[in-house]
Image (cartoon, rainbow, N blue to C red):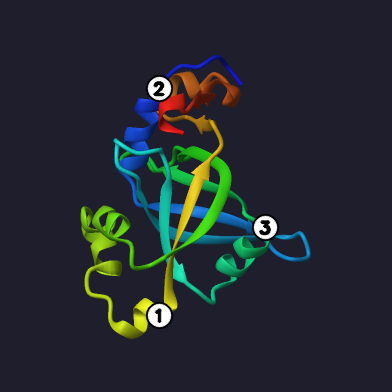
Amino acid sequence: MKSQKFNFFFIENEVRNKTFGILTTTNLDGTPHTSGVLYGVSTHESDFALYIVTGRDYKKTKNISENSAVSFIIPLPHHILRFVPSATVTITGTAEILPIENKELLDIFSKKRILRLITGHLTAEEKKELIFLKIKPDPKILCYGVGINIIKLRSGHTEGGYSVRIPKERR
């Protein structure tokens, strides 16, 4: 990987602008389990974390209860140049299971329309079945192609990779 080209705040902004990511957990037999999910991001005033709403009985929830290590990839597709591979942000870390009735997290989900559709009007039955997953990232975030000029990427695929570190005050 090349030296740092962009800082955490640039990447945090890119992550905040999206709501879809790919979560990988580990099955009991050690194989990976991958799911596409919608996510929300912690407030600027708190530690940087990602939040996912999912079912209490889903495979990813069961996996996390046994092994909290996760990987989360956020694709950043090129909407105009569709033939160009998506840029990505890869976050590794640990996940924990939180109750769905958490005002702070519900407020985070209320800020984006697509997320509000998930949590906006939960029934009593849904509140029994749903939980939040909190992804606490490792300090180092891996990035590929985020903010990199397409011409530079064409000169070699390794030109697009770099990492940023989450500042201590946000961990």
Residues under numbered marks 2 and 3 in contact, where contact means CB atoms less than 8 Å apart: no
The alpha-carbon separation of the residues under discs 3 and 1 comes to: 23 Å
Amino acid type at mark 1: Lys
Q: Is residue 1 left or right of residue 40?
A: right
Residue denoted by label 3: 67
Q: What residue would you read off at disc 1? A: 128
Percent of width and height locating residue 93: 57, 43
- Mark 3 or mark 1: which comes first in sequence? 3
Which x, y percent locates residue 165? 50, 25
- Nearer to me, 33 or 105: 105
Question: Which image quarter: residue 8?
Answer: top left
**Mark 2 secondary-structure assignment:** loop
| Residue 149 tag number | 2
Disc ID at residue 83? none
* Residue at image location 54% in from the left, 73% down from the top: 58
Query: Which three-letter amino acid code belongs to the residue tagged 2?
Result: Asn
Q: Nearer the viewer, residue 53 or 45?
A: 45
Q: Please state, as top left, top right, bottom left or bottom right, where the N terminus lies in the image.
A: top right
Q: Position of residue 6 (x, y in %)?
A: 42, 20
Q: Secondary structure at mark 3?
A: loop
Q: Mark 1: which secondary structure?
A: helix
Is 117 situated left or right of 125 in this image? left
Q: Position of residue 84 (x, y in %)?
A: 44, 37
Which residue is at the front of the view, 51 or 145?
51
Residue at image point 28% right, 81% down? 123
Query: How far is the residue under mark 1 from the one under mark 2?
Result: 47 Å
Foreground label between 2 and 3: 3
